[in-house]
Image (tube, grey):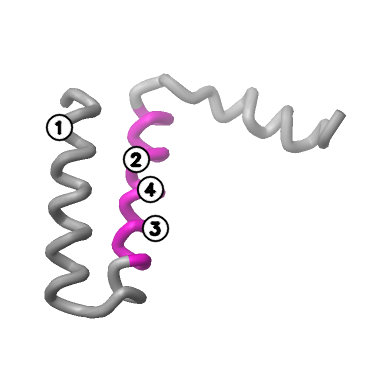
Amino acid sequence: MQPKVVGLFTGLLLGLVLVLTNFGDMLVVALFGAVGYMVMKVVEGEIDMGEVVDRARRGPR
């Protein structure tokens, strides 16, 4: 799915959650959306977790 379409539906979903509940609930939905997005990038191979772990172990330069 194209990033624009994903962004559109994410925005619509967050707007709907904000209208139906409160701001805190919207932040929880946004957090889960971000986690799901990152998981899919790993599954699709766009993010190499080995490289991420190596960078984390090395620390800041």
Q: Which residue lies furthest to the right in this view?
A: 61
Q: Going from the N terminus, do you reach mark 3 or mark 2 first?
A: 3
Mark nearer the N terminus (3 vs 1): 1
Q: Which mark is residue 31?
A: 3
N-terminal of the two: label 2 or label 1? 1
Disc 2 designates what residue? 37
Marks 3 and 1, Cα distance to the nearest angstrom? 19 Å
Q: Mark 4 points at which residue?
A: 34
Cβ–Cβ under 8 Å for marks 3 and 2:
no
From what the image shows, is residue 19 above or below residue 11?
below
Residue 32 place in picture, x, y as percent: 35, 57
Real-space CA distance between mark 3 and mark 2, rounded to the nearest whole angstrom: 10 Å
The amino acid beneath tag 1 is Val
- Along the line of sight, the residue nearer the viewer: 61 or 41: 61
Between residues 8 and 40, which one lies in front from this camera angle? 8
Check if mark 2's residue and mark 1's residue have beta carbons within 8 Å.
Answer: no
Check if mark 2's residue and mark 4's residue have beta carbons within 8 Å: yes
Q: What distance separates the C-alpha of mark 4 from that of mark 1?
A: 15 Å
Q: Position of residue 48 (x, y in %)?
A: 53, 23
Badge 1 element: helix
Say few, some or many: other residues with alpha carbon within 10 Å of mark 1 (under 14 / 14 to 19 / 20 or more): few
Q: How crowded is mark 3: few (under 14 residues within 10 Å), some or many (20 or more)?
A: few
Q: Is mark 4 on a helix, strand or loop?
A: helix
| Side of 2 relative to 36 (left or right) | left
Give the magenta part as a residue range.
Answer: 27-43
Residue 42 position by quadrant: top left
